[in-house]
Amino acid sequence: MSVTDISNVNIRSIETEKKIQRVQDEQSFWLNLGPQHPATHGVLRILIKVDGERVLEAEPVIGYIHRGHERMGETRGYAQFFPNNSRMDYLGALTYNHGYCEAVEKLAGIEVPRRAAFIRTITSEYNRLSSHLLWLGAYLMDLGAFTPFIYIWEERELINDLLNHVTGSRLTYSYNRFGGVHKDIDEQFITGSRAFIKRLRKRFKMYNRLVTGNVIFQARAKGVGAITVERAQAYSLTGPCLRACGVEYDIRKKEPYGVYSEVDFDIPTGQNGDAFDRYMVRFLEMEQSLRIIEQCLDKLPDGPYRNEQVDQYLAPDPGEVFFAFESPRGEVNIFIKSDGTRIPYRMHWKTPSYSNLSILAELMRGEFIADVISIMGSFDLVIPEIDK
Amino acid sequence: MSANIEPGLWNWLAYWLSPEILVAIVGLLVVIVLITVNSIGLIYAELKVAAHVQRRPGPMEVGWHGFLQPVMDAVKLLGKELVTATAVDKTLFIIAPAIVILPLLVSFIVIPFGEKLIIRDLNMGLLLIFSFSALNVVGILVGGWASHNKYSLLGSLRSVSQNVAYEIPILITVMSVVIMTHSLSMQGIIAAQSRIWFIVIQPLAAILYFVASTAETNRLPFDIPEAEGELIAGFHSEYSGMRFALFFLAEYTNMFIVAAVFATLFLGGWRGPILPGPIWFLIKVYALVFLVLVARWTFPRLRFDQLMTLAWKVLIPLALANLLVTALVIKLVQ
């Protein structure tokens, strides 16, 4: 092939490319998924450019529920930030409470009674269970199966009843206190928990039959939104989304807090990093949560549930603290800087849904509209936690 | 003067009041009532089946066990404002619901409820049903296009390609029954099943027809034209009030017709022991509808390309193979 031939080919290909681009521009249009859309579960907005059913580009738009939680934390006392925890991640309020407490306790050097640490771990795991259950129902509802959503509601109701019994609330718990918890757990909670664990194990078998083995569900989830380990790490994915790629990374194991170092549990991982693996990881994680709760109930020591010496309106010595904990959606990092007053000088949160969201645009490109919904659903995004 | 008019009037009356025309007029009125009652009954059944599949009681307040809930819903829809957005194509937007429902009314002409209970037993009855129910999709396309809404447009386009894809396996499977009966008349097909139901001889055709017709009626797991998680409400996103209700009516009527055709083709139509024909027919039809309802509340939705793959790569080859085998066997037997 001579030089001129190559240049001709090049010129032609550029022209063809321009033509293709023009045709694409005429054929495609922008579709606005959200902020009010049944599948976004909140006020997430995703702009997708579609050519028929095929998505050419996707662009998440966030900030519709930005409430300035970090700034709020810098204008009020440490204890006054508890309610904000449950507004940031309304499905993992207790895990956030737990993490925030441990961070401030690390900053102020507060001792926590052993019983309190156990209670915190139990309630955190219950919260993780209820969050994963709701995700399971919501994801399947996105895929068109409405019934599992009603089924998980039964379990969630029981968890809410149990937590309501000890914490006094059902969604926005502010249960933890610096140096312990607000209220002790009693015999009724323990017997109720044991009955619930037994019941949920039975129900998991039913979910496996109804959902996991379903041909249509597998067709909709397998191979959809597959992420390699390299891409996952480049986008700093965390939580079940990262574990689904095969990375065994869980703060509860890597930097244990609470009493996670004293209980025996596994980190479920996937291989392909697709929506089905994310489903399986969360499903198996729920079983691990049951194991953790069971062991904590067995080992639950007697003693005080709260360090009564601690003043809730505390003023830590000047200094800073970095703390990481595992929320149902992944690793949350807290940075708090104290200047010795009762109000934090600086507070920063790195939340898991925010970093998980960043890979969505890349994953959605070239997929079908239906897969965009499946991918978004499998990520378990909590929008207030993205916008903070 | 009057004597001159009288014979003309009489002839005119005699023409218009011939038994056949009378049957048609009465039949049309009965069909309109039937469609409404059927839809109300099916909405109630859907509410209750959904509720019991999901372990909850469902509607309980209006009437005995919520029996009047669908009536209340219909009354509510009657009272709703007919919202017409500014950018819609007004003419098309308004006639689309009518285009959807009218062909379905025509199909009732040939549905055999009993030995004598049929408006007209046309010798091409089956063909009439399929040609008119294919028109249904035109209304959906028009409605989705006229709505001036991207979600509606996507939904109606999905609906068209789905209906085109699934008409073919339906017609091919029906062919394999027709070459056994040598008749396109509904009563003729039922008469051919006097000894044995065709579901026994043609089980594959029955399954194929059931799957394809579920897709044809846009029911879950094939409800992608109105996939709520993806396209809000698909082609009827912009419709409100009775216009929306007409789409709803069409969906449930379509379900009834599809089940009636299934009962006629494979379950011996109105034939059955002891009970009178019409009751047997309705039992068979509603048993099939019940199956579709339970399936809806059990399965997730297929993806668009998977749906097309199912039609073109699985159902159509199987239907063709079934037709070929049927034809061969009939030729050999003869």
Image (cartoon, grey):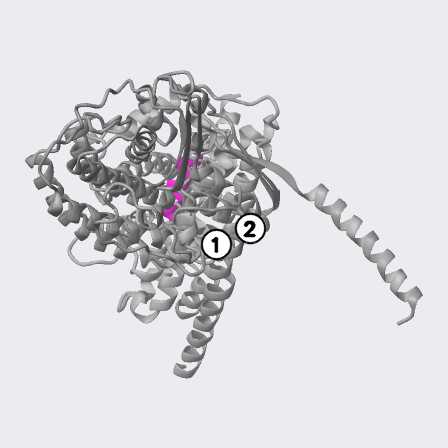
Chain for disc number 2 = A
On the image, the x and y values in percent for residue B115 come to: 29, 53
In percent of the image, x 33 and y 45: which residue is there?
A136
Q: In the depicted view, which residue is nearer to us: B80 or B172? A: B80
Callout 1: few (<14), some (14-19), or many (20+) C-alpha neighbours within 10 Å?
Answer: many
Callout 2: few (<14), some (14-19), or many (20+) C-alpha neighbours within 10 Å?
Answer: some
**Amino acid type assigned to the residue bearing label 1 in the image:** Val
> Which quadrant would residue A98 be assigned to in this image?
top left
- Residue B278 sits inside the magenta stretch: no
In percent of the image, x 15 and y 37: which residue is there?
A115
> Which quadrant would residue A57 be assigned to in this image?
top right
> Which quadrant would residue B251 be assigned to in this image?
top left
Q: Which residue is mark 1?
A: A224
Dot label at residue A209: none
Q: Which residue is mark 2?
A: A367
C-beta proximity under 8 Å, tags 1 and 2 = yes
Chain part drawn in magenta: B246-257
Q: Secondary structure at mark 1?
A: loop
> With respect to residue A167, does A60 lie above or below?
below
In the image, taking residue A211 as reference, residue B214 lies left or right, namely: right
- Residue B248 sits inside the magenta stretch: yes
First of labels 1, 2 by sequence position: 1
